[in-house]
Amino acid sequence: MVTTAQPALTAPARTARELLARVLDLAPSVEGGELVFATEVPTELLADLKVLHTGVRALLTGRAWWGSSTDAPVRVRVLNPNEPIPDGIGLVCVEGDARWDRIPPAARCDCPHLFAASVPRPVRGSFPRPYETRP
């Protein structure tokens, strides 16, 4: 019986630190505030890098990675590069950046592994009033 070796399947990176570990062989660096690589980035990592490039830049430069909500009230917080992007974060930047980068809206569908599981919020009026009973 002849068997062929199958390539090892690896889970996708879930955090900026995991993604940095996957691209270290590509010699990433930061030039002029932009993330650059010495060699071509594999296509399977491009979507994740589009979302986490600021987190990878923050790790490479040793600066804080910031996240902000896009709805009111605006909440700004330091993000942990060892964790997925928290629920409600729509803007990200690295300490010292002149502007915020918007996380592409499709990223939550295309790369759900990069985001912390969201907590479902109750819909107004979805709970019975204390004096009501439901069968």
Image (cartoon, rainbow, N blue to C red):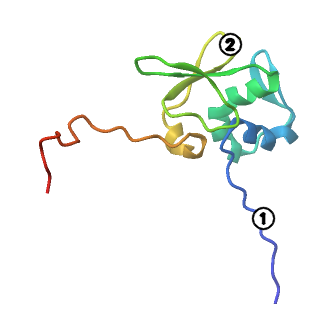
Looking at the image, do the residues carrying marks 2 and 1 touch, with CB atoms under 8 Å apart?
A: no
Q: Which mark is first along the chain, 1 or 2?
A: 1
Q: Give the number of callouts.
A: 2
Identify which residue is drawn at 81% across, 81% down: 3
Residue 96 lies, with reference to residue 1, above or below; the image says above
Residue position marked by numbered label 2 in the rendering: 97
Q: Amino acid at mark 2?
A: Asp
- Specify the quadrant of the image occupied by residue 27: top right
Residue 67 lies, with reference to residue 27, above or below; the image says above
Determine crowd level at label 1: few under 14, some 14-19, many 20+ residues with C-alpha closer than 10 A. Answer: few
Identify which residue is drawn at 63% across, 40% down: 47
Residue closest to the eye, 27 or 16: 16
Rendered-image quadrant of the C terminus: bottom left
- Specify the quadrant of the image occupied by residue 101: top right
Residue 52 image position (x, y, % from top left): 66, 33
Side (left or right) of 103 relative to 16: left
Identify which residue is drawn at 80% across, 22% down: 62
Residue 33 image position (x, y, % from top left): 75, 17
- Specify the quadrant of the image occupied by residue 121: top left
Residue 24's tag is none
Residue 39 image position (x, y, % from top left): 85, 37
What element does badge 2 sit on?
A: loop
Q: CA distance from mark 2 to mark 1?
A: 40 Å
Q: Amino acid at mark 1?
A: Pro
Residue closest to the eye, 135 or 2: 135
Rendered-image quadrant of the N terminus: bottom right
What element does badge 1 sit on?
A: loop
Side (left or right) of 25 relative to 65: right
Residue 7's tag is 1
